[in-house]
Image (spheres, rainbow, N blue to C red):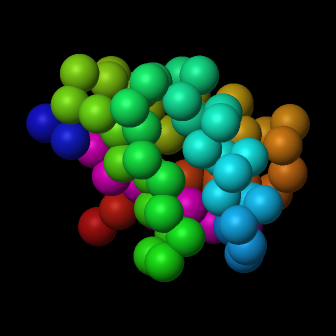
Amino acid sequence: MTRVFEVSGMHCGGCLSRVQVAAEKLAPGTIVTLEPPRLTLPQNATLDAAAINAALAPLGDYRVKPAG
C-alpha cells in the first residue's frame, strides 16, 4: 500500500530538493511534490511519520503528517 504524507514547511524548489534527497536516503523511490506539498512512499516502504520527521529535522522546519 502506498503511503502519502502532507509536508509542512516546503515553500520553494530548494525546499523540495532537500526533502527529496533526505526521503530518497530513507526509501528509494519516494516522490516529493511541492503543489500539493506531499511525500509519497513507495509500496514496499514501512516508514512512519516519526522516522521521516527525524530525518528531516536537521534540514529545517519540515514536518510530515499522514495525508487525510
Report x, y in % for residue 58.
86, 36
For residue 3, above or below residue 23: below
Can you tell which quarter of the image residue 57 is in?
top right
For residue 23, above or below residue 28: below
Whether residue 66 appears in this view of the structure is no
11 sits left or right of 24 in the view: right
Whether residue 27 appears in this view of the structure is yes
The residue sitting at 35% across, 62% down in the picture is 67
Report x, y in % for residue 31.
42, 47
Can you tell which quarter of the image residue 29 is in?
top left
The residue sitting at 13% across, 36% down in the picture is 1
The quadrant of the picture occupied by the C terminus is: bottom left
62 sits left or right of 49 in the view: right
63 sits left or right of 32 in the view: right
For residue 3, above or below residue 6: above
Q: Which residues are magenta?
A: 3-9
Report if residue 8 lies within the magenta region: yes
Report x, y in % for residue 17.
69, 51
User: In terms of secondary structure, what is the magenta stretch mainly?
Assistant: strand
Q: Residue furthest left?
A: 1
Q: Nearer the viewer, residue 10 or 64?
A: 10
The residue sitting at 48% across, 78% down in the picture is 35
Report x, y in % for residue 18.
74, 46
